[in-house]
Amino acid sequence: MSENEPILKVRNLSVHFNIPTGGIFGGHAVLKAVKDVSFDLHAGETLGIVGESGCGKSTLSRAIIRLIHATGGESMWMGKDILKMSPKELIALRKDIQMIFQDPLASLNPRMTAAQIIGEPLQIHYPEVSKAERTARVAEMMAKVGLTPEMINKYPHEFSGGQCQRIGIARALITRPKLIVCDEAVSALDVSVQAQVINLLMDLQKEFGVSLLFIAHDIAVVRHIAQRIMVLYFGEVVEIGESEQVVMDPQHDYTKKLIASVPVPDPKEEMRRREVRRKLRREAAAAA
Amino acid sequence: MAGLTSRDAILTEYNQQLLNAPKGRSLAQDAVRRLVANKAAVFSIFLLVTILLVVFIAPYFLPWGYSQVDWANIRKPPNFEAGHFMGTDQNGRDMLARTMQGTQMSLVVAGVATLVSVVIGVSYGAIAGYFGGRIDAVMMRFVDIMYALPYILFVIILVVIFGRNPILLFVGIGCLEWLTMARIVRGQTLSLKEREFVEAARASGASPWSIIFRHIVPNLTGPVVIYATLTIPEIIITESFLSYLGLGVQEPQTSLGTLISQGSEVAVALPWMLLGPAVILVAMLIAFTYLGDGLRDALDPKDR
């Protein structure tokens, strides 16, 4: 495989859900959560996916790595279609693609210690590693994500939200994956902690050379971490391009709206954005 | 991973330091702390442990065995000189010894049946709930069918097949008691499997079995423990009922149910035959109920 070949190539991916409409004969409507999404992701790159709640961001991310069933299209990982992998290949794939979740506390099993949680992927993919070695690796990873290794025996409820998310990051990094899917990884944290976690992710990305698929509804956050941004609207890609270009010169009306909705601590700029929002609303009303 | 095992020496030293890392406070420890703060529950535990110790140890120190007949004292009220502290029955057997043996039998039976029902019910319910879809539908319809059949019929069939072996009989009862447990566990599993930590485990490549037994079952502890403490008295009552019908424990062995059914026939003439076993049964039932209550509060502090 050549250097410039993307590690992940998603082509025409779509996910449809059958919504039962009631009745005993199984009548159902089809909800198209993701429609014909295509993009490339290169090694070491960060692609941001933005869009409002319910636009299919999370569904898309889960369908790419086959946590939910995709209806059509393909998701090529290093030249192999994830959607057609055998169960054995799929388990091997989980080592290379890890995930970070939205709710830091809910994504950790309340009955396991930090050591057990972070060490679990290691135990699954490298069962030959001794327990002592595993503990040492967990401690090392905890130090890397900014947790003191002395906290190794603590349970999730004894950590703060930001610390829990660091545990989630440590768990995702422990098998040295090539891609991490961050599903709203910072949305549940407050702003100062958000910044810490994002900077941590960027540092770790530099250190391990991992690619990130960074999903968020806040375009300001995504702009900070991602080189490229993909804007999703009702399951469709409306715009994809370099971050600065998408933010400074949005092409699609929805992207313009999304950017105008970000509050800025500058009254003049805020006024200008309010004007943009009004203008868009007037145009929409005129069109209707 | 290359070079994973070459650094063992350094790692071992590092690990030694980590061994001294402070232990976290687990959810179970939290629950125990809350349980200890509950006076009724603590008293119930104390009462149950006392009953348990007394009925298993004291028989060795009694002057009379449970099947030994004292021809000089038949149908006699408590008589301390002769060593019959709770009187004797119509056959001249010491009531205290018989009550203790009966309590032993009831507790063993309840313990075995509850254990069987927990093991089967939790595995069955968690598997049905986790895999869902058609597997779930088939498994739970089987439970519905079992529910619809009268258990007395089963017990009679079991007695016919296995004879009157009490332990085997109550393994059989446990095999029927698991139905409710399976339903409770399935319901809990349905909600647990949607939690993010289960998805995280799936994303890490954990197998369905390891997800069920490492991530789901430990998180079911609350409802399972609570339901189990409520199952124990239920089985004691079931056993009393079966013994009353003559399907339970066989003479000269006895159980609380048998003793009470025999005592109730002569309650006016020989009240000591009824009082002892009845008091112990009632005390145990109340203690288990309060213990279950305390456990519920301790394990789900949120929905009180």
Image (cartoon, coloured by chain):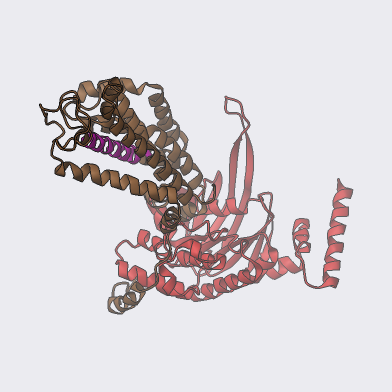
Chain colours: A red, B brown
Residue A88 image offset from top left, x and y in percent: 37, 52
Residue B155 makes an appearance in the image: no
Task: Tell me if residue B210 is in the magenta stretch.
Answer: no
Q: Main secondary structure of the magenta part?
A: helix
Task: Tell me if residue B112 is in the magenta stretch.
Answer: yes
Q: Nearer the viewer, residue A268 or B274?
A: B274
Residue B294 makes an appearance in the image: yes
Q: Is residue A249 above or below residue B168?
A: below
Q: Is residue A229 above or below residue B133?
A: below
Quadrant assignment, res A192: bottom right
Q: Nearer the viewer, residue B179 or A240?
A: B179
Q: Nearer the viewer, residue A206 or B201?
A: B201
Q: Is residue B132 above or below residue B192?
A: above
Q: Seen from this angle, which residue lies furthest front?
A: B81
Residue A139 image offset from top left, x and y in percent: 40, 72
| Left or right for B71, reference B164 | left
What residue is at 21 percent from the left and 37 percent from the top?
B85
Q: Nearer the viewer, residue A108 or A78?
A: A108
Which residues, given as a range, are shown in magenta?
B99-121
Residue A130 image offset from top left, x and y in percent: 29, 67
